[in-house]
Image (cartoon, grey):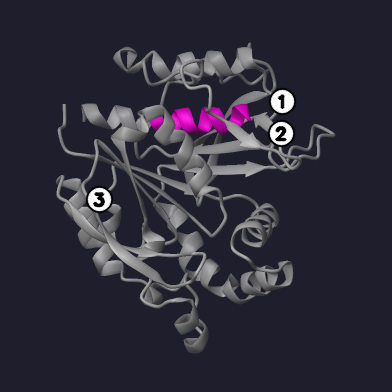
Amino acid sequence: MTHRPIILGIVGDSAAGKTTLTRGIAQVLGEDNVTVICTDDYHRYDRKQRADMGISALHPDCNYLDIIQQHLGLLRTGQPILKPIYNHTSGVFDPPEYIKPSKFVIVEGLLGYSTRGMRDSYDVKVYLAPPESLRTAWKVKRDTRKRGYTEAQVLEQLHKREADSDAFIRPQREWADVVVSFYPSTNTSNQDDLLLDVRLVLRPTIPHPDFSTILHANGNHLGSAVRLELDRDMGKPVDVLEIDGQATEKQVHELERMLCKEVPYLGQFCSLEGNPGLGKIVGTTGETLQSYPLAITQLLITYHVLKAITF
């Protein structure tokens, strides 16, 4: 058993769903056991300076990547850091925060896999890759409701950032152990943009749970709502687990058992019943919705974090 902190990376473009995913994983592990670090806090310039310079927050030159790498190294060995804080509401920097790492550290942000030293600091690396149309809708909704932008300003910002997204954010997909893509279902008339299907690319860079019992050419006993397929991602062979938004509670609980049976002593963590907030999201009209694809995604990543303890 390792006694150093276990570090999980969650990287993706702005409004790709990093915070929602992080929140559920922290709930399973116990919030007192988790330290969350946002690499967006390591911007070199505030919002006004970036506008004056014509540089986006997505560009490596706009971020202290060397300090992120240094801090990841310290956290991995259990040492504290003095972390900067970027205020997304005001666009300026708040006083830094003294942070001691907990048992688990989740590092989320835009450029977390940009250097070899940073990548080597993680035990598990996740990349979020929703379709651009969906990410645009999420960003408009978030930035107009929480950050005071107009829709036109958000769309203009996305347009200006596109070149940097393509050059610096999306290539980080290559380094992920798990690639998560939520996407709208084509098999339902439900138009709520939160009840989504999920496609989970499972790369052989880390050992994944044994889902072989649901790998059948002619379907499986869990039904068509849960599928495991062989595919290629960025030219390399991968397993792909797909879960429809219409998957049933029974199907999801069976997947949960597959996740937990390999590490039975961790069953206290790995449970939908024991974590009723898993997969819960607020719908467009304010009601609370249960997304089983989100819940299983949170559990799968939690499984990998807990599994890393034994290595």
Is 205 magenta? The answer is no
Q: What residue is pinned by disc 2?
A: 287
* Viewer-proximal residue among 24 and 48: 48
Q: Is residue 282 above or below residue 276?
A: below
Residues under labels 2 and 3: Cα distance?
39 Å
**Which element carries disc 2, helix, strand or loop?**
loop
**Which element carries disc 1, helix, strand or loop?**
loop
| 16 sits to left or right of 23 | right
Q: What residue is pinned by disc 3?
A: 121
Q: Quadrant of the N terminus?
A: top left
Q: Three-letter amino acid code at disc 1?
A: Gln
* Viewer-proximal residue among 273 and 301: 273
Residue depicted at 63% across the width and 58% down the height: 139
Q: Three-letter amino acid code at disc 3?
A: Ser
Question: Callout 3: few (<14), some (14-19), or many (20+) C-alpha neighbours within 10 Å?
Answer: many
* Viewer-proximal residue among 154 and 166: 154
Label ID, residue 246: 1
Instruction: First in sequence, mark 3 or 1: give its number.
Output: 3
Q: Is residue 41 above or below residue 24?
A: below
The residues colored magenta run: 291-302
Q: Three-letter amino acid code at disc 2?
A: Glu
